[in-house]
Image (cartoon, rainbow, N blue to C red):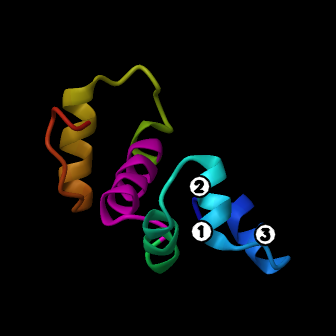
Amino acid sequence: MTYPLVRDLAAGGFPVRLACGVLGFSPQAFYAGGRQPVGDRELEDACVINALIDAQGDDPAFGYRFLADELERAGVDAGERRV
């Protein structure tokens, strides 16, 4: 969750609206973060990063073009610019 302090304060009986106001963000952002704490793009980025770490494990001197080709062979959809 992105807002652990607000969650902890709310568990202690502190109003969420007041905690969010003091910390400088909206209650809507707090509640939206609770429904989907990790976004789709962040999850996809984590998968791409894990595949890159696996591909680069043998020789860390590989460039982005080689790594993009390795990701394509592994079935991960990511362009050269993203790599």
Q: Mark 3: which secondary structure?
A: helix
Q: Amino acid at mark 1?
A: Arg
Label 1 sits on a secondary structure element that is: helix
Q: Does residue 35 sit above or below 6 in this rendering?
A: below
- Real-space Cα separation, disc 3 to disc 2, in angstroms: 15 Å
Residue positioned 16% across, 32% down in the render? 81
Residue found at x 51% / y 67%: 27
On the image, the x and y values in percent for residue 62 come to 35, 24
Q: In the visual, does 55 lie left or right of 34?
A: left
Specify few, some or many for label 1: CA neighbours under 10 Å numbering under 14, 14-19, or 20 or more: some
What x and y, as percent, mark residue 3? 62, 60
Question: What span is colored magenta in the figure?
Answer: 37-53
Q: Is residue 15 left or right of residue 83?
A: right
For the residue pair 5 and 42, the one nearer the viewer reads as 5
Helix, strand or loop at disc 2? helix
Image disc number at residue 17: 1
Q: Residues within 10 Å of mark 3 (few under 14, many from 20)?
A: few
Q: What is the distance, in whole Å, between disc 1 and disc 2 at their CAs?
A: 6 Å
Image quarter in which the N terminus is found? bottom right
Cα distance, mark 1 to mark 3? 13 Å
Indicate the position of residue 23 as horizontal and vertical percent values.
Answer: 63, 49
Q: Say if the magenta span includes residue 12.
A: no
Name the main secondary structure of what is drawn in magenta. helix
The type of residue carrying mark 2 is Gly
Marks 1 & 2, CB-CB < 8 Å contact: yes
Question: Residue 8 got which mark?
Answer: 3
Q: Is residue 55 visible?
A: yes
